[in-house]
Image: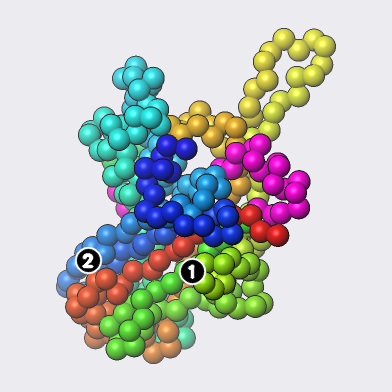
Amino acid sequence: MPLLNRLITGLVAICGMSTIIGSGFCMWVFGAGWETSLSTEAKIEVSALADVGKLRLIGNLEAQQEVKEDYKENNKLGDATEDKWDSLQTNDGVKIDNLIKMYTTRKIVFTEGNEDSNSLKDGLTFYRFKRDKDLDIRTYIRENEVRGGYAFVPSDQYEAIIKSGMKFKIGLRVTMPSVGNGMAISDYLELDEKYNPDNSNNPTFSIYHNGSYVNFLDLTDSFFKFEDATPKQEDTSSDDSTSDNTTTTTSNEVVFSDYIEDFSNCKVFNFELDLQDMFSYKPGKKPNTSAKLKEIKEAITNDSSLWKINFDFVTTYVD
């Protein structure tokens, strides 16, 4: 799978088969009379520990779709292939790798919330970069849902391994920098307990990594609206059928031909995440005054590397 191999940052075995994807978040802070945009540039870092398909966030697929549409518009659709990935770009010259980074970026926006210190999610919103097709511009839009992503697993591999008695899993582990001096994001925000993979009450599974077992939240649980999104085949078995088998879509509108990568021989699974539901301010840290909001601004300015939330995804098979 050429694209995955181009992005590899390390090759290590975890249970023989798994893929981890990490995603960072950027920060914005707004307050009365001033505004600052601090870049802790969000990155998608792929560490291919073995090849269990491909996990693609929604933004990744949107970027592929936009580039493919531009190539079709210019009658160059044959050039929009995986083996020419490095040279692919939009009509306005944005390379596909950069477009993927733009569309998978999330920003947390801190605003001066209401005075109720118990409303710990108030004053905390999430944005992402997206193309507005009607206005033909790219801009940040408010979107609290990651809307998760898709895992594309080769069908023949999947069927053989599932028949052997193993289960396919998508896992998530969320981490935030912690230094304990009041200057890191973990001093102000906390992850809701139901998203903590170390909580035994949550749907989790473990993989062996670097000498120890690591817990991951099980995104294949129905809580995350996990579903088999593999497009179904039309029934053309009747004698009077004259058409070829045509791939239809599920409600998720997964259309293989929309993307530059070829997922046509894959099992497809998707999941959803709600960022607004995942995070809240710690007690006493909600910026319900200008002074508290300024405190957050100064902490980010002091060391922006401590203000990044990391999402580590794993796709694997477990016993």
Q: Is residue 142 visible?
A: no
Kind of residue sitting beneath label 1: Asn
Q: Residues within 10 Å of mark 1 (few under 14, many from 20)?
A: few
Disc 2 is placed on an element classified as strand
Is label 2 in contact with label 1 (beta carbons under 8 Å)? no
Residue at which label 2 appears: 38
Q: Which residues are magenta?
A: 139-168
Residue drawn at (50%, 32%), measured in percent from left and top? 262
Relative to 133, is 55 above or below? below
Residue drawn at (37%, 53%), measured in percent from left and top? 9
Disc 1 is placed on an element classified as loop
Kind of residue sitting beneath label 2: Leu
Q: Is residue 157 magenta?
A: yes
Q: Is residue 8 magenta?
A: no
Q: Residues within 10 Å of mark 2 (few under 14, many from 20)?
A: some
Question: Where residue 221 sits: x, y (%)?
Answer: 66, 61
Relative to 69, is 204 above or below? below
Using residue 233 as the reference point, say whether residue 57 is left or right of it. Answer: left
Quadrant location of residue 62? Answer: top left
Q: For the image shown, how many numbered marks are present on the structure? A: 2
Quadrant location of residue 180? Answer: bottom left
Question: Where residue 117 sits: x, y (%)?
Answer: 42, 87
Residue drawn at (40%, 66%), measured in percent from left and top? 310
Question: Where residue 90 sits: x, y (%)?
Answer: 29, 33
Relative to 29, is 238 above or below? above
Residue at which label 1 appears: 210
Return the disc, 2 or 1, that comes first in the chain's sequence. 2
Relative to 4, is 42 above or below? below
The image quadrant where one finds the C terminus is bottom right
- Mark whose residue sits in front, 2 or 1: 1
Residue drawn at (64%, 37%), measured in percent from left and top? 155
